[in-house]
Image: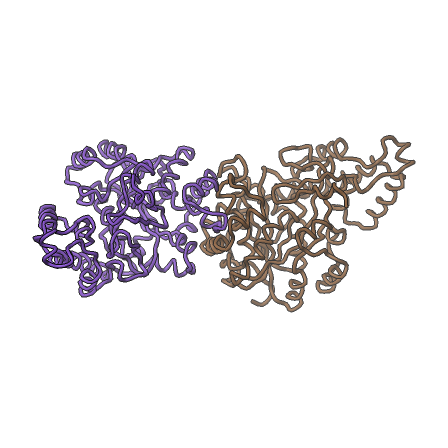
Chain colours: A brown, B purple
Amino acid sequence: MDKVDEDDVVNPWEVATSSATGVDYDKLIKRFGSTKIDDALLQRIEKVTGKPVHHLLRRGKFFSQRDMHIILDLYEQKKPFYLYTGRGPSSDSMHMGHLIPFIFTKWLQDTFDVPLVIQLTDDEKYLWKDLTLEQANHMAFENAKDIIACGFDIEKTFIFSDLDFISNSPAFYRNMCRVQKLVTYNQVKGIFGFGDSDCIGKISFPAIQASPSFSSSFPEIFNGRSDIPCLIPCAIDQDPYFRMTRDVAPRMNCLKPALIHSTFFPALQGAQTKMSASDPTSSIFVTDSDKQIKDKINKYAFSGGGATVEEHKEKGGNCDVDVSFQYLTFFMEDDDRLEEIRKTYTSGELLTGFLKKELVEILQKLVGEHRQRRASLTDDVVKQFMTPRKLKFDYPP
Amino acid sequence: MDKVDEDDVVNPWEVATSSATGVDYDKLIKRFGSTKIDDALLQRIEKVTGKPVHHLLRRGKFFSQRDMHIILDLYEQKKPFYLYTGRGPSSDSMHMGHLIPFIFTKWLQDTFDVPLVIQLTDDEKYLWKDLTLEQANHMAFENAKDIIACGFDIEKTFIFSDLDFISNSPAFYRNMCRVQKLVTYNQVKGIFGFGDSDCIGKISFPAIQASPSFSSSFPEIFNGRSDIPCLIPCAIDQDPYFRMTRDVAPRMNCLKPALIHSTFFPALQGAQTKMSASDPTSSIFVTDSDKQIKDKINKYAFSGGGATVEEHKEKGGNCDVDVSFQYLTFFMEDDDRLEEIRKTYTSGELLTGFLKKELVEILQKLVGEHRQRRASLTDDVVKQFMTPRKLKFDYPP
């Protein structure tokens, strides 16, 4: 239909769009072959859990899925499943976009009362970036702190660095080998766009991200059970890994993991700009001070408002491209207040300055609480999270 | 020069020649870029060790090398080095050809008094063959018994299965990752002939065979030292792995491994026939009974003698294609006796039957002693050999 959307690039290493309103997610669902999350699914989640769905689900931030109905069937039957998510450590601190999957994963953990494994792919970062193994591994440990500060339950959460865990886990390594035997170079070339001058580490890496999808990779955690299904909350750019995983799973006599996909979090400068951990002006970091948050939002957050107060009052603001409003849709929990802001900003009644002020307050509170939780974390607690051990199940085994 | 030799195929998974006298090793040295072992090197080995060289060296069975002079320099300076060899387990028992590198490695260990690591690439066999991980791993354990029965010193020898060791060794796994980052698909395609429909496990496997070349892969064994040079005795078909290893070593700040290469051991049916662990008539196995040895040599060992006694007496035998004679060059220690046999067989004086009888006696003794040593091995001893631990060094650290 339009050329712009045809140009969206979405893969695990690059997300790029030339549209100010961001990636065309409906087209992406078609391209990836996943299923859109519809009202019926949201209602079913509320019915089986007896709780309202998270605002990130309500507002379509998590918008796509594979086999969620199977997971809900299991939950209804009081049968166990587990959550798996991950992160490629990229610098010593994480930005708000990095937190989205973890905020939602925590809600899933709390709501469904299930165990969670979190993979830190320090090996991936080592292979893709100009880093030493030690640097990548250090970043994994620092990122683990940011993840733990999201509030995960220590009795139900295992966080691991690939570099540390794989070389201490025969079961995980064997599943890696199984996947590596079933996937050809042609396949990873087609799925990930690898080329002949890529290193052999990159070419075999997808097997490493696939392996946590199988409970048999974690015998210490799941009591040796290989039949516990997995639900993976992640940003949609990670879907190629799990399309591959779902393809090989039946040939390994394993269950296909279910998925729930999020949209991307925009850079302060707008959806067309790449958010980067190495550019401090492109986002709010979990380590930013109150003043930094205020200054960044006021200075860099792309405005959909008029160029002057008069123009804004006359023509109104455009919420679809206004980054401050978009951030509010991720972080403001109160639906009524958000709708009021949307209406009054669109009409021109609410000025950009007030909108930004509201966002600054919410982010200062969120980041402040996160900062506090992170500061109170001891290395010992981090090590506990990162020690393979039996996780608490509330369902009968 | 001649078409026949141009057709020699030599790579880690296939050795094939259409010449009855076997692969043209001089051409192979040129193609691989290694150095022929000359008399000067043999004399130097005898000089620095004060012992006669092994008959496999004297007779050109180990015929090619890389950097052997560096190893001898170290030995003269009383500086340490270690040996690394390996085996891809292929069935529950090994044949005589499999034993050659181990017989020679034992001599190197005894003569230079150095530690030795032996890699069993059960992961490779899993990736290349129609086997489960459990089957490949079991074969590794069974093969370890045959290797130990060659008489290695338990205080100086560590034997490991990749599947068991890699997932228990952070240092080894990290070196694997380092190699995987430095080698591209293009390179393994060029070196090993991998194709686009090969699985990603095969494509990244060369990094696994490379890693034992670095002492930093074994901190438990070498007391954390990363500067201990390595000498690899192996059949020349394994050289491609170590050309790759020597290429990446400097970029890893690691020492290049030195190498000493053997020729191939012919099948009973002759150098043109592929010896196969799955074909019991193609070789003598270490599990064969005295009767099986006798019957196989008499029935299958390709003869270079005349078709009739009269013809043989008239024209003489051809030692170059006679498999029994070739086997004697590998296993008969007495040079004078071997030379006498060569002369009298060539002249036609010695009949094929007598030649075979001599070989049968030697093999029955060798295999009998091996069988006895293997039978006396307990699983506990095998486990000791396979436990990572500090190996005994006689040199000051």
Q: Is residue A12 visible?
A: yes
Q: Position of residue B380 (x, y in %)?
A: 29, 59
Q: Quadrant of residue A370?
A: top right
Question: Which residue is located at x 73 percent, y 43 percent?
Answer: A5
In the rendered view, tell whether residue B376 sits above or below residue B187: below
Which quarter of the rendered picture does the C terminus of chain A lie within?
Answer: bottom right
Front residue of B346/B234: it is B346
Residue A217 spot, x, y in % from top left: 51, 57
Task: Name the residue at the left extreme.
Answer: B349
- What residue is rendered at 37% in x and 51% in y? B121
Q: Is residue A265 left or right of residue B292?
A: right
Could you tell whether A249 is left or right of B242 in the image?
Answer: right
Residue in the foreground of this view, choosing between B216 and B47: B47
Is the residue B184 above or below the residue B158 in the image? above
Q: Position of residue A353 (x, y in %)?
A: 82, 35
- Residue for point 67% across, 35% down: A288
Count of marks overlaid on the render: 0
Q: Is residue B60 left or right of residue A362?
A: left
Residue visible at 49% across and 45% down in the picture = A163
